[in-house]
Amino acid sequence: MELRNLASIAVASVLVLVPNTALAGEFPGDQCATEGQVVALGGGAIKCIGGTWQPSQETPSSGSTGVSTVKQAKNFKLVGTALSAATFNSPDQQVADVTAIRLPNGNVKLFVYVANQFIRSATSTNKSGTSFVADSTSILSGTAAGQPRVISLGGNSMRLFYLEGGNINAAISNDGGVTFTKEGPVITTAQAGFEPGGLTVIKQGGGYRGYFSNLEKPGERAFRVMRTATSKDMINWSMGPEITGASGTIKDGGSHPFAVIDKKGKIALYYAGDRGSFYGILVSTSKNGVTFSNEKSVITGGGDPDILPTGKTSGLMYYGADLGSGLGFGINVAKSTGNIVP
């Protein structure tokens, strides 16, 4: 999901260099030729939307015979659609990379990438956080940015992390997310060792721990690397180890992570990944923030998860998905049916 939504910002040249054909084994973010085509990817499916493969919940024309060996977390259940292109009166059918925050009045504000509109926001019409209307103002004055992640600073204050110019940048708001003041880059490509994707942050000990992955790009089949970093102020970050691949414990990789920590310090990391007969949202847990285990599947065909806690162990998950019925790519909302830190 994070592939296509930033293509027009940072990686447009890639689109020219990659053959416009759909090949066996394509993954979300790769280019495709036949608009609307749905093919199997493991136990799920991908659909050709706007020239790019996107995760889909539709029935593929050629099914998968594999059976997923990933255990199910069974801790979230789909409620419905939170945002679509129609929410923002967008003709491009591409709404992705959502992030959520609870406002002081109890309503929920979502920040999201909208094709050709960059970062926009929407506010819930109810405190349950399931129905939304678009806010009239654009975020960051229409800066060509994407993959927002928001964290509350208390009251009407919040910090927004986002991608711009190949770096993770930050901006701060003190008026409930209406206007933001840019704080500049906080993690650069040089620091990360690769071009980073969106940053998720949790409080741990006396500071903060963040997670991010390498930025997916159309046509690239790079291994999906996730890395952790630590900070005392959310602005100056020290790079930690990669938590994927040969040097990490999430051996098969993952992208666009989101972290949740409980009162005992246990961390749940949600991320998108392909596990042969499964593509969608996965979750692994850790006690120290570096070593992860007990990987389970959460939602087939979804990606870019962001969780808003609603209680000690409960929460809402907002995530990207093909909405089907010609609606394009948008944001679904799921409600927890079990502990969000399983």
Image: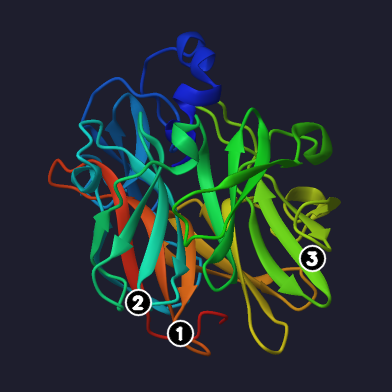
Q: Nearer the viewer, residue 127 or 253?
A: 127
Q: Residues within 10 Å of mark 3 (few under 14, many from 20)?
A: many
Residue where numbered disc 3 is placed = 290
Residue where numbered disc 1 is placed = 314
Image quadrant holding the N terminus, namely top left
Q: Residues within 10 Å of mark 1 (few under 14, many from 20)?
A: some
Q: Are marks 3 and 2 in contact (CB under 8 Å)?
A: no
Residue appearing at x 31%, y 78% in the figure: 127
Residue where numbered disc 2 is placed = 335
Q: Are marks 1 and 2 in contact (CB under 8 Å)?
A: yes
Residue appearing at x 45%, y 43% in the figure: 139
Q: Are marks 3 and 1 in contact (CB under 8 Å)?
A: no
Type of the residue with mark 1: Ser
**Badge 3 element:** loop
Residue appearing at x 52%, y 16% in the figure: 14
Q: Nearer the viewer, residue 300 or 278?
A: 300
Which numbered disc, 3 or 2, marks the residue closer to the eye?
A: 2
Q: Is residue 313 above or below residue 228?
A: below
Of pointers 3 and 2, the one earlier in the residue sequence: 3
In percent of width and height, residue 326 lies at: 14, 40
**Badge 2 element:** strand
Residue 219 visible in the shown view? no
Q: Residues within 10 Å of mark 2 (few under 14, many from 20)?
A: many
Whole-angstrom CA distance, mark 3 to mark 2, is 27 Å
Residue appearing at x 72%, y 59% in the figure: 210
Of pointers 3 and 1, the one earlier in the residue sequence: 3
